[in-house]
Amino acid sequence: MSNDKKKVLVACGAGIATSTVVTNRVERILKENSINAEVEQIKISEAKGKQNGADLLVSTTILPTTFDIPTVIAVSYISGINQEATDKKIIDALK
C-alpha cells in the first residue's frame, strides 16, 4: 500500500446535510481499509474548481458536468440500498 495521502471530495447539492452522512461513511471505509486520505465536504457547484489535486469525487447528487477525476455517485448511502457496492467503488478508485 502506498503512503501517498489521497484527497476525496464529498459533494451534495447544498454541501450540508447529505454530504455529512456520506463523509462520515467514507471516512470510516477509508480507515477500515487503511487508506490514508483527507475528506473534504463541498457543494457540487464547487467540485469543478476543487478537482485539481483530488483523487476522487463522491457525490450524492447527479453530476452537473464531467470531471477529470474518478467519480462515485453515493445515493445508496442516503437510500440505504446497495451501500456495500458503493463502498467497493470508493475503495477501488483509491487503490
Image: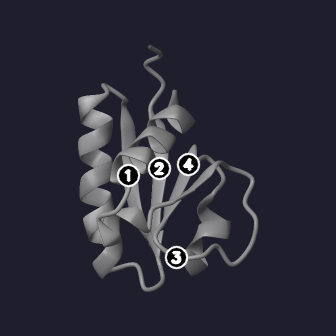
Question: Which residue: 63% across, 57% down?
Answer: 51
Q: Secondary structure beneath disc 2? A: strand
Task: Give me the disc on residue 8.
Answer: 2
Question: Which residue: 72% across, 60% down?
Answer: 67
- Residue with the mark numbered 4: 56
Mark 4 neighbour class, 10 Å CA radius: few under 14, some 14 to 19, many 20 or more: many
- Marks 4/3 in contact by CB < 8 Å: the verdict is no
- Residue with the mark numbered 3: 61
Q: Earlier in the sequence, mark 4 or mark 3?
A: 4
- Residue with the mark numbered 1: 39
CA separation in Å, label 1 and label 3: 17 Å
Q: Secondary structure beneath disc 1? A: strand
Three-letter amino acid code at the position of disc 2: Val
Viewer-side label of 1, 3:
3
Expressed as whole percent of the image width and height from the top left, the position of residue 48 reads 67, 68
- Marks 2/1 in contact by CB < 8 Å: the verdict is yes
Q: Earlier in the sequence, mark 1 or mark 3?
A: 1
Expressed as whole percent of the image width and height from the top left, the position of residue 5 reads 44, 31
Mark 1 neighbour class, 10 Å CA radius: few under 14, some 14 to 19, many 20 or more: many
Q: Is residue 28 above or below residue 95?
A: below
Q: Earlier in the sequence, mark 2 or mark 1?
A: 2
Three-letter amino acid code at the position of disc 3: Thr
CA separation in Å, label 4 and label 3: 15 Å
